[in-house]
Amino acid sequence: MAKGQSFLSEEEPTSKGLTRHLNVIITEPTEDMNYLVVPITSYREDTNGNPIPGQDDSCILKAGSHPFLKHKSYVRYKNARQMSAVEILVGIQKGLLIRKEDMNPRIIQEMQRGAEDSPHLPEELRYFFKFFLQGGE
């Protein structure tokens, strides 16, 4: 596993039935092979074109920013999580997670800036991310 790799989540229930979200690794591994993984979900607007409340605008992605993204989307930092390489690899081997194309390095940088700016990134993950940015010092 490496920064920039992506995979589809396990199926999650939504108002439209079961769906999978694109997840992206946005850090290099820690010494114990953990990564910060963020999910991406569709950006929603009301009939007047105004954003639906509760969405995080720290990192908005255009349709086509990744081959899987067919609509304007955003990084849902509130659902970010720390995952181990083993957890990801076993999930892929069991078919629970589905490996997708790597994310463009420029987009990864945007996602990292969004993680720094987002008020929705859980506090414990904010510490993990800041530790990563400081080179583990």
Image: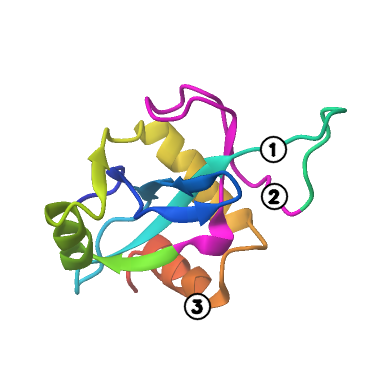
Is mark 1 in CB contact (under 8 Å) with mark 3? Answer: no
In the rendered structure, find residue 44 and report the number of the disc placed on it.
1
Q: Nearer the viewer, residue 18 or 134?
A: 18
The quadrant holding residue 38 is: bottom left
Query: Tag 1, which secondary structure?
Result: loop
- The residue type indicated by label 2 comes to Gln
For marks 2 and 1, the one nearer the N-term is: 1
Distance from Cα at disc 3 to Cα at disc 2: 20 Å
Residue 112 vs residue 91: left or right?
A: right
The quadrant holding residue 74 is: top right
The residue beneath circle 3 is 124
Residue 120 among those drawn in magenta: no
Q: Looking at the picture, how far across and down is residue 111, in whole percent?
A: 49, 45
For marks 1 and 3, the one nearer the N-term is: 1
Residue occupying image coordinates x 61% and y 49% = 15
Predominant secondary structure, magenta span: loop
* For discs 1 and 3, the disc positioned in front in the rendered view: 1
Local packing at callout 3 (Cα closer than 10 Å; few below 14, some 14-19, many 20+) is few
Local packing at callout 1 (Cα closer than 10 Å; few below 14, some 14-19, many 20+) is some
Residue 31 vs residue 125: left or right?
A: left
Quadrant occupied by the C terminus: bottom left
Q: Looking at the picture, how far across and down is residue 98, in whole percent?
A: 25, 45
- The residue type indicated by label 1 comes to Arg
Residue 76 vs residue 18: left or right?
A: right
Residue occupying image coordinates x 46% and y 26% = 65
Q: Which residues are magenta?
A: 54-80
Q: Looking at the picture, how far across and down is residue 103, in whole percent?
A: 34, 35
Q: Looking at the picture, how far across and down is residue 30, in whole percent?
A: 25, 68
